[in-house]
Image (spheres, rainbow, N blue to C red):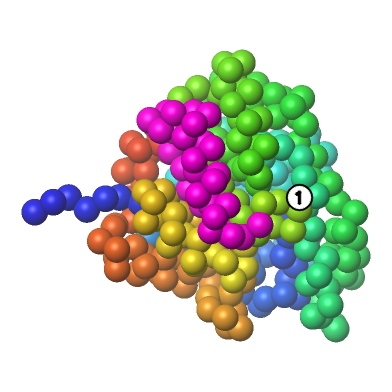
Amino acid sequence: MATKVKVVISCAVTGSAHVPTMSDALPVTPAQIADQAIAAAQAGAAILHLHARVPEDGRPTGDPQVYARFLPVIKQGTDAVVNITTGGSTTMTVEERLKAAVEFKPEMCSLNMGSLNFAFFPAAKRITEWKYGWEKDYVVNSDDYIFRNTFRDIAYILENLNDAGTKFEHECYDVGHLYNLAHFLDRGLVKPDFFVQMIFGILGGIGPDLDNLMFMKQTADRLFGKDNFQWSVLAAGRHQMPFITQAALLGGHVRVGLEDSLFIERGVLATDNAQQVTKAVRILAEMGLEPATPAEAREILGLKGGNLVSF
């Protein structure tokens, strides 16, 4: 009997763009983040992509002391790979974004491969009452946010974490970001085998059209060589499940989670992150694919192991 192909499922548990008013399911406190992360791993996620939030009101934070309240709990509750953001939020400096990753030296970190307009202000039109005072201005003012990721910023992050043995989820929001990644490959700051996360449907990034997925993959193959990288796909909002389905059909890995979409189907809010992971596992099964275990994900991505982190 042929061995089923393994697909690495990442789950982005809370993010920084969505605000608590948008969904009661969005984890905010350290306990909520830990509980949902562990449940997502139990449902089939091999990688847990993590941001932190101020427990009292859900604001994004890069404070390592907040991370320290849930990282050890997650490590005790699951052997899933922990992936700490270096993106933080669009309102943080790169130094603020990097603090937790430098302190905790995880197996993986996200790394945004270029600057872009990162906007979610249209969501404000659907909200009449806000839970917390900071939320409305944060969402409405995103029409003026630039998600800064200059060449200097990217080099700074790479240089600060490469010695820790941390590997990166290279987040590419547009075709130009693939060329930026090729630049760092040429400089020797990135080395094969690396992991590319192709992102679709963010207002300011490449649009959620399946032709764009094909173009991004073909461009990556041409720039990097098919055998030099692993790749995954995420898509925002209602495009989440169709895009991961297409990515899996093409041989890629997939990412779900409440950071990327608050919904489980059209017009229906997800109850938690695990519900989205469970749906992704079901989609993969229909195609004869299986979710990779954390151990298999470590082997596929060449990670250093959960015993070599600092939490």
Residue 31 in which image quadrant: bottom right
Residue at point 17% right, 50% down?
3
Q: Nearer the viewer, residue 72 or 199?
A: 199
Question: Is residue 271 rendered magenta in the image?
Answer: no
Q: In which quarter of the image is the N terminus?
A: bottom left
**For the residue labelled by badge 1, is the local secondary structure a helix, a strand or a loop?**
loop
Q: Is residue 287 above or below residue 193?
A: below
Residue at point 67% right, 64% down?
28
Q: Is residue 255 above or below residue 280?
A: above
Is residue 12 found left or right of 133 in the rendered image? Answer: left
- Number of on-image labels: 1
- The residue tagged 1 is 89
* Image position, residue 216 (x, y; %): 55, 44
* Image position, residue 84 (x, y; %): 59, 44
Res. 133 in view: yes
Q: Nearer the viewer, residue 146 or 77?
A: 146
Residue 116 in which image quadrant: top right
> What is the magenta range?
207-235
Residue at point 53% right, 58% down?
210
Question: Is residue 226 rendered magenta in the image?
Answer: yes
Res. 75 in view: no
The residue type indicated by label 1 comes to Ser
Q: Which of 266 and 175 is in front in this view?
A: 175
Is residue 103 found left or right of 287 in the rendered image? Answer: right
* Image position, residue 255 (x, y; %): 50, 55
Q: In which quarter of the image is the C terminus?
A: top right
Residue extending farthest left: 1
Residue at point 88% right, 66% down?
140
Q: In this view, does 259 lie above or below 46?
A: below
